């Protein structure tokens, strides 16, 4: 059987993003897969732009990637106790694609943040948006990487064994959904 298609979505655009590091760890824990990283460099949602030109091709491409993926992992950083504009903008845009994107899609959300709560509020808000989009949220203990600047070693691996175990459990649960 072909490897499952796994799409990763980072709510941070930064090259050195801890959330992108966390996604790389999630991919490794998921096991063999055809992995694609989504590009959230999208225009800001604007109803006038949508009315004049329709949904931009970059958004349609993202929606197709989500639809065609067997599973999706989202890393949601926390900005000012909320979801980042980058991630919310992407979720808003894909919700405007008539064919839909996330409906019934197996999704796990993880977070890394500088603060002590590991982005818990942003993760909660992301899960709330995904509920509205009818994603199939795979339950499990929350993966919240606090003090992210100290959480990864020089190779980008999670230092803490408990965090590694939580992430591995979530990725195992996600993979089991595809069987
Ligand atoms: C505008 C802004 C707001 C932030 N607000 C929070 C916050 O509410 N809670 C938190 O834990 N970290 C906050 N941070 C710090 C981020 O967690 C930190 O920059 C983190 O590295 C962002 O994720 P990234 O490494 O994937 O880019 C904020 C950072 C920025 C730029």
Image: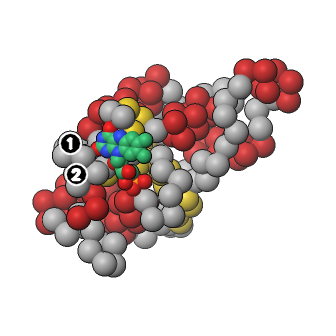
In the rendered image, which residue does mark 2 sit on?
Answer: 146
Does the rendering let one see residue 40? yes
Give the residue number, with chain letter if any, for mark 1.
117
Number of marks = 2
Quadrant of the rendered structure where residue 51 is?
top right
- The answer to whether residue 19 is above or below residue 29 is above
Where residue 178 appears, as percent x and y from the top left, is: 41, 51
The CB of the residue at mark 2 lies under 8 Å from ligand 1: yes
SS class of the residue under badge 1? loop
Classify 146 as above or below 29.
Answer: above
Please tell me which residue lies in front, 138 or 82: 82
At a point 23% along the width and 64% down the height, the residue shown is 150
Q: Please name the residue shown 19% across and 58% down the image.
A: 163
Upstream in sequence: badge 1 or badge 2: 1
Q: Secondary structure at mark 2?
A: loop
Q: Residue at x 85, y 29 (%)?
A: 53
- Left or right? Give the position of 82 relative to 173: right
Q: Label 1: few (<14), some or many (≥20) within 10 Å?
A: some
Q: Residue furthest right?
A: 52
Residue 108 visible? The answer is: no
Q: In the image, is the residue at mark 1 within 8 Å of ligand 1 by its beta carbon? A: yes
């Amino acid at each position: 059987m072909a490897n499952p298609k796994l799409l990763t979505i980072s709510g941070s655009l930064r090259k050195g993003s801890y959330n992108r590091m966390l996604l790389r760890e999630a991919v490794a824990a998921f096991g063999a897969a055809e992995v694609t990283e989504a590009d959230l460099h999208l225009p800001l949602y604007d109803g006038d732009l949508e009315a004049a030109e329709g949904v931009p091709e970059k958004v349609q491409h993202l929606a197709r990637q989500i639809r065609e993926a067997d599973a999706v992992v989202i890393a949601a950083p926390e900005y000012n106790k909320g979801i980042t504009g980058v991630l919310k903008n992407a979720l808003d845009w894909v919700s405007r694609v008539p064919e839909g994107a996330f409906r019934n899609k197996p999704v796990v959300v993880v977070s890394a943040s500088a603060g002590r709560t590991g982005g818990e509020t942003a993760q909660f808000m992301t899960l709330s948006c995904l509920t509205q989009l009818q994603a199939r949220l795979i339950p499990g203990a929350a993966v919240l990487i606090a003090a992210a600047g100290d959480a990864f070693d020089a190779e980008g691996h999670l230092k803490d064994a408990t965090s590694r175990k939580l992430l591995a459990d979530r990725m195992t649960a996600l993979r089991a959904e595809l069987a």
